Amino acid sequence: MLSFECKKFDSFSPQELHDLLALRSEVFVVEQNCVYQDIDGKDLLALHIIGKSKEKIVACARILAPGVSYPEKVSIGRVAVSQTQRGKNQGHELMNYCLKQTKAHFPAVTIKISAQAHLENFYNKHGFKATGEEYLEDGIPHIGMIL
């Protein structure tokens, strides 16, 4: 069981910020062999969800207010769980916490995500439905999804 927190960017300690960016790099750059610009300026505007195990960040996501990524829609992105924590239902715990925080901060606002296509069934289990066709984002197949 992970312990979750919802934080703004300026409330991170230097160690937490390092660990958050290291996890995202571990998952999205190294593991997926994808060179892309992770630091995109949106972190400064996001609500960050971090999941810790023994005080180490092992899961994360970010929630973006309407207008940051999509007009009139909230976005959840940069959803990652360390390889060491997979297979333990941590991804579902993380997404449940993200949805709870999204509803608390942005009640009655539609959520839109850009999901890696191979995770469509994962997001379906949380109520998301695919919209449109698959597309490439940073060389990886993605699909738009709405909740």
Image (tube, grey):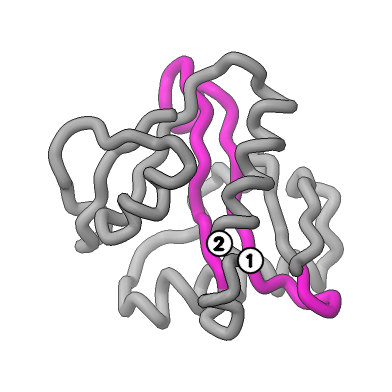
Residue on which disc 1 sits: 59
**Where 41 falls versus 129 (above or below)?**
below
Q: Quadrant of residue 132?
A: top left
Magenta span dominant secondary structure: strand
> Which residue occupies the foreground of this view, 88 or 48?
88
Left or right: where 55 falls relative to 27:
right
Label 1 is placed on what type of residue? Ala
Q: Residue at x 43, y 18 (%)?
A: 71
Residue range of the region highlighted in magenta in the rendering? 52-81
Q: In the displayed structure, does residue 8 sit left or right of residue 103?
A: right
- Neighbours of disc 1 within 10 Å: few (<14), some (14-19), many (20+): many
Cα–Cα gap, marks 2 and 1: 8 Å
Q: Residue at x 85, y 50 (%)?
A: 11
Q: Residue 145 at what x, y percent from top left?
A: 34, 36
Q: Is residue 76 above or below residue 119?
A: above
Q: In the rendered structure, find residue 91 and report the number of the disc placed on it.
A: 2
The amino acid sitting under disc 2 is: Gly
